[in-house]
Amino acid sequence: MEKYKVAVIPGDGIGPEVLKESVKVLEHAAMADGRFEFIFTWFPWGCEYYLKTGEMMPSDGIRILSAFDAILLGAVGYPGVPDHVSLRDLLLRIRHDFDEYINLRPVKLLQGAPCPLEGIHPGDIDMLFIRENSEGEYSGQGAWLYKDTPQEVVIQDSVFSRKGTERVIRYAYEVAKKEKKTLTSISKGNALNYSMVFWDQIFAEVGKDYPEVETHSLLVDAAAMFMVKDPKRFQIVVTSNLFGDILTDLGAAIAGGMGLAAGANLNPERRFPSMFEPIHGSAPDIAGRKTANPLAAIWSAAQMLDFLGHEEWGTKIIQAIENLLVSKENLTPDQGGTATTEECTAALLNYLK
Ligand code: NAD
Ligand code: IPM
Ligand code: MN
């Protein structure tokens, strides 16, 4: 029997509400399969923890987490703690310190999911965003000079290393080659005359090793427009940390909403644990009402099963989400329903059984 040690960090707002549900689904998968089991360890880290201790996680938090096979995270950030503190010291810290340099975010319109675009059907939106997740615009480097004076200057540095840029682009080519799909690189070389010119150069260089992959390069502004006007043109997409962040919220908007948007932060070499989390935040506007949509967190748990080598379960869970959406029953308010978070999961589990 394969035993997976999974660290669970529910975090803030709706984070704990949705994570509880994804754990139920994982427990069901393990029980029904019988060949693997999960040992979950819960960590109460996040904004409440910060207000009590002055830290988002203990100073040896990264060492503690390094003993796990994977991490499940709900959401981080809440009014009362500055976002740049809460996110930098927990979520971004884990992504960075565990070298989770691949952020896999499917933008796929499932059967039954709502789409605000006219004339677009499931199958027309089927993208996989591969977002650089360890450096770029998120390097956290910079300076704040002459603070609180009229001469004040702030500098926020983007860092694009050859290693960091090559590895994410190569990963994307590998996926495109394996899945026989097109690869679109999204950048902004016309304005960002160092970082994005470099990105485009590496995209072309690495591409020489993949003559069989059909490629496209788009500027990020045009890419945002085409995602709405002609989403069919995108299959595998590779882009920088910040552009990937912004475009995957746009992706969520065209593919069923934030309540359905999943993501995986991968360390492909498996030297460190990878982390699975919905791409939405803590949603303070609906927290505590028991109406948060758990499906994004559940889809992220399905990505974890894929990564651990149980793809048949990943596929079954997506199928169950699709059945639930098509039935139009037991959906949460963001999907036009009246179900609670727990009722939604219970209905999903019925499809899974
Ligand atoms: P958000 O994603 O929390 O919410 C945006 C909108 O989407 C809200 O109207 C919310 O109600 C809705 N929404 C999000 N998830 C939903 C779900 N599962 N079901 C139903 N509706 C859902 O973004 P925000 O309001 O910009 O950020 C809130 C906080 O979360 C901030 O502190 C932000 O920094 C943080 N944040 C954290 C993460 C993360 O931990 N991965 C991601 C994004 C934002
Ligand atoms: C996301 C979030 C984070 C990001 C924030 C909360 C730091 O928006 O995972 O999409 O920008 O990566
Ligand atoms: Mn985001």
Image (cartoon, helix red, strand yellow):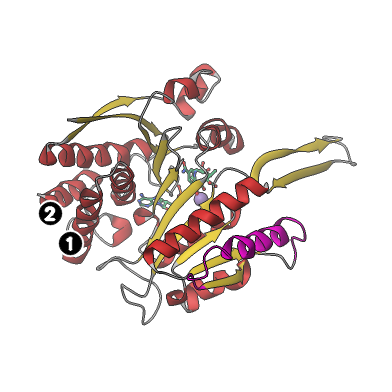
Locate residue 315: give its quadrant.
Answer: bottom left
Residue 21 located left or right of residue 70: left
Q: Position of residue 233 (x, y in %)?
A: 46, 76
| Residue 204 in magenta stretch | yes
Residue 254 located left or right of residue 39: right
Q: Which mark is residue 323?
A: 1
The answer to whether residue 245 is visible is: no
Label 1 C-beta lies within 8 Å of the nearest ligand 1 atom? no
Q: Is residue 107 above or below residue 37?
A: below
Q: Position of residue 204 (x, y in %)?
A: 63, 65
Q: How many marks?
A: 2
Q: Which residue is mark 2?
A: 351
Q: Nearer the viewer, residue 308 or 284?
A: 308
Q: Is residue 33 above or below residue 353?
A: above
Please state, as top left, top right, bottom left or bottom right, where the N terminus lies in the image.
Answer: top left
Q: Residue at x 29, y 60 (%)?
A: 335
* Disc on the earlier residue, 1 or 2: 1
| Residue 245 in magenta stretch | no
Determine crowd level at label 1: few under 14, some 14-19, many 20+ residues with C-alpha closer than 10 A: some
Disc 1 residue type (three-letter): Asn
**Stretch in magenta:** 191-214
Asked if labels 2 and 1 touch by Cβ distance under 8 angstroms, the answer is yes
The answer to whether residue 71 is visible is: yes
Q: Which mark is residue 57?
A: none
Circle 1 SS class: helix
Locate residue 243: give its quadrant.
Answer: bottom right
Q: Is residue 267 above or below residue 329?
A: above
Disc 2 residue type (three-letter): Tyr
Q: CA distance from mark 1 to mark 2?
A: 7 Å
